[in-house]
Amino acid sequence: MNRFIVKITDCDHPSVDIERNVISRIPADMSLHQCKTEEDLIHECADADALINQYAPLTRKVLSQLKNCKVIVRYGVGVNNVDLEAASEYGIPVCNVPDYGIDEVSDHALALMYTLTRKTLLLANAVRRGEWDFSISRPILRLRDQVVGVVGLGRIGSAFAKKAHGAGFKVIGFDPRRTVREDLSFMESVSFEELLQQSDMISIHCPLIDETRNLFGEKELRAMKSSAYLINTARGGIIDEVALDQALREGWIAGAALDVLELEPPRPDHPLLQHESFLATPHVAWYSEQAFDELKRKAAEEAVRVLNGEEPLNRVNAMKVTN
């Protein structure tokens, strides 16, 4: 019996033992590669029956050379480094892991929101410098009087909305895909324009697609309250970073906290890093030890599922599985 070939295109995890254990359930050989370019992928992975992918660019050029590939699974939710249209044309289902790290990302968004609004980092850094003066944080407003706007109401956005509501905030929401979950009856659904105008804090939880690229540009940032804060734990590219830099310099909004940037890691002289009202964390919102293990296990299980001839659970490209 021929054995399947499963290849991890690239991975910055310290171990792939979890994936190897899952793949061992079927007749398959798994190998780890560290592909960076299209040429690396074509050279190392052209014979694969399944690919598990992290950052390597799965472009049309690469996909055209995958003669045996039955499935591509990406570590994580976003699939921006995979050409979905080309994958569909070549009959390759592309899958993600949308149901891991939900608590982690929503908790991280809350942590960033509280850090901004209670100005804890500003004050902690001042104490470290020997300054013991609460007045440098003025103004701090009572949080339960504030309105939290949620952009994107999928799994993570809904979890964030529920937690914000449980903490006593009034929550309003807008979903670019025009979907609202039934279990968010406590939340008022509004237009994007209304959300910009009414929110004291806005937390972004939508995917990066054509409709959401630069969703927050100059016009939108100017429409926000000058006292408002913007949080993004979704994807870089949803916020126009040039416009955000101007917004912070000129006081259109009070501050921003991003876990994701268009280019990661940012260069040390990135303009946003010069603002005291700006916080950045290193794309870590998804992380806990439990979420890390869950991500790896579920990615491998999806590959095994398809190689076993079953339908994938989390296909993201519109197509029928024909191979």
Image (tube, rainbow, N blue to C red):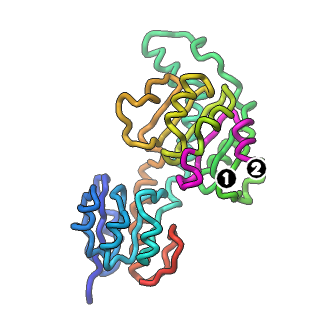
In this view of the protein, which residue sits in the foreground, 290 or 298?
A: 298
Q: Horizontal and vertical percent for residue 83?
A: 43, 64
* Residue density around tag 1, few if under 14, some if 14–19, many if 20 or more, within 10 Å: many
Residue 1's spot in the image, x, y percent? Answer: 26, 89
On screen, 199 above or below 163? above
Tell me if mark 2 has few (under 14), some (14-19) or many (20+) residues whose alpha carbon lies within 10 angstroms of its own.
many
For this view, does 11 lie left or right of residue 299?
Answer: left
Q: Quadrant of the C terminus?
A: bottom left
Which residue occupies 35% across, 30% down?
Answer: 268
Q: Nearer the viewer, residue 280 or 320?
A: 320
Magenta stretch: residue 29 in it?
A: no
Q: Secondary structure at mark 1?
A: loop
Q: Which residue corresponds to the image point at 32% horizontal and 69% vertical from the top-left?
A: 21
Q: At 55% from the left edge and 55% from the top edge, which residue is drawn?
A: 210
Q: Circle 2 sits in a helix, a strand or a loop, which is it?
A: strand
Q: CA distance from mark 2 to mark 1?
A: 9 Å
Q: Which residue is mark 2?
A: 189
Residue 232, image x, y percentages: 54, 41
For badge 2, the amino acid type reads Ser
Dividing the picture into quadrants, the one containing residue 82 is bottom left
Q: Which residues are magenta?
A: 189-214
Residue under numbered circle 1:
175
> Most extreme residue toward the bottom, as rendered?
1
> Relative to 259, does residue 62 appear above or below in the rendering?
below
Q: Is 4 rendered above or below residue 293?
A: below
**Circles 2 and 1: CB atoms closer than 8 Å:** yes
Q: Residue at x 35, y 34 (%)?
A: 267
Please indicate, yes or no, whether residue 131 appears anywhere in the rendered image.
Answer: yes
Could you tell me residue 166's position as x and y percent? 70, 43
